[in-house]
Image: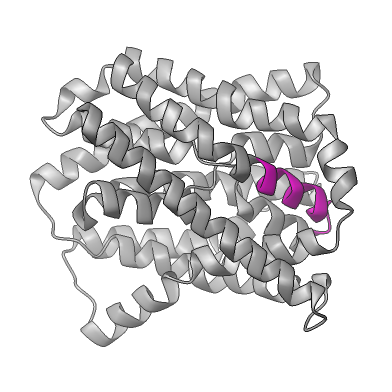
Amino acid sequence: MTGDNFMHISILLMEQIAELFLMIFMGFLIVKTGLLKDDDSKVLSKIVLYLIIPCVIINAFQVDYTMDTVKGLLIALAASVMIQIILLIILSVLGKLLHLNEVEIASVYYSNSGNLIVPIVTFILGQEWVLYGCVFMSVQLVFLWTHCKKIISREPSYDWKKIVLNINMISIFIGIILFFTRIRLPEIIGNTLSAVGSMIGPASMFVTGMLFAGMNLKQIFANKRVYFISFLRLIAVPLFSLVLLKFSHLASLSADGNQIMLIVFLAVITPSASTVTQMCQVYGNDSRYASAINVVTTLFSIITMPLMVMLFQMIV
């Protein structure tokens, strides 16, 4: 990656994050002007979780089947699963040592890849590369609807029937089947899924902004804990993931290995997942705290994401 390419990526990252902030501000204004209440965002959260995200997943797998694509998918899958499992083990231990609550653990562990990875990869590498980013999203969704749902809802055990029958899990299954059977959906259905899926960024950010409007802003930015969680999400997790990718040597398995590893890394280094906020709303946890972490990590990611891409360029 040349210096010009790095500068180009840095500018694109800043533009995408700036757009997210404008969307958050719109959600903020909707509540502050009295059009809606901050609690009204719960309806929008359900639309994102159960309608928009499934459309994104199915649409992502609507690409041409080739052996190179399959090989790339397997490499992206290996990298994504490796990072998620090892991070979960380490965070389970650190969570106890650092006295992290459920919202903090979820905010550190889950990245906002769903909102950022698709537009960023599209602009940087092209539409044909988005699929590899969606592999990470799909792996993370499996963990979101198992591990994250369990800790956020404080359920004593996993309800595997609900997990398997969850619309997001079904969407992943449908997407994989359509890809490997080389079935392309009719244009009218594909266009509909694409149109609905494109709402993921705005809708998720509106939820964050609406919740943010109901908070005490001074209290949020005076909370040192938020900055510590932001450090773990934006610095510690990306650095650890970078070391894992470097020593896994997965990039050497394909001519496109470096690009695939960059896509997986871009998915890892994004701010905390807005889905955590939405799950907190739906399952009765501290959604305002989750929203505060999401906003602060999004703010700092303007600086940290370009820096992490630079480190990737130097190390991998």
Instruction: Say if the magenta span includes residue 284.
Output: yes
Residue beneath the point at 22% across and 33% down: 4
Instruction: Say if the magenta span includes residue 107.
Output: no
The answer, for residue 45, to whether it is visible in the render is: no
Q: Dividing the picture into quarters, in which one does residue 48 lie?
A: bottom right
Residue 253 relative to residue 84: left or right: left
Q: Dividing the picture into quarters, in which one does residue 177 lie?
A: bottom left
The one nearer the camera, 160 or 117, is 117
Above-or-below relation of 55 to 243 = below
Above-or-below relation of 77 to 48 = above
Q: Position of residue 156 (x, y in %)?
A: 80, 44
Residue beneath the point at 66% across and 64% down: 25
The one nearer the camera, 113 or 248, is 113
Q: Residue furthest bottom?
A: 188
User: In which quadrant is the C terminus drawn?
Assistant: top left
User: In which quadrant is the N terminus drawn?
Assistant: top left
Residue 240 relative to residue 300: left or right: left
Q: Main SS of the magenta segment? A: helix
In this picture the colour scheme is: one colour
Q: Position of residue 13 (x, y in %)?
A: 41, 45
Q: Which residues are magenta?
A: 283-296
Residue 95 relative to residue 62: left or right: right
Above-or-below relation of 128 to 254 = below
Above-or-below relation of 163 to 97 = below
Q: Position of residue 278 (x, y in %)?
A: 69, 60
Residue beneath the point at 36% across and 47% down: 12
Q: Position of residue 236 (x, y in %)?
A: 58, 21
The one nearer the camera, 40 or 247, is 40
Residue beneath the point at 62% across and 55% down: 275
The answer, for residue 24, to whether it is visible in the render is: yes
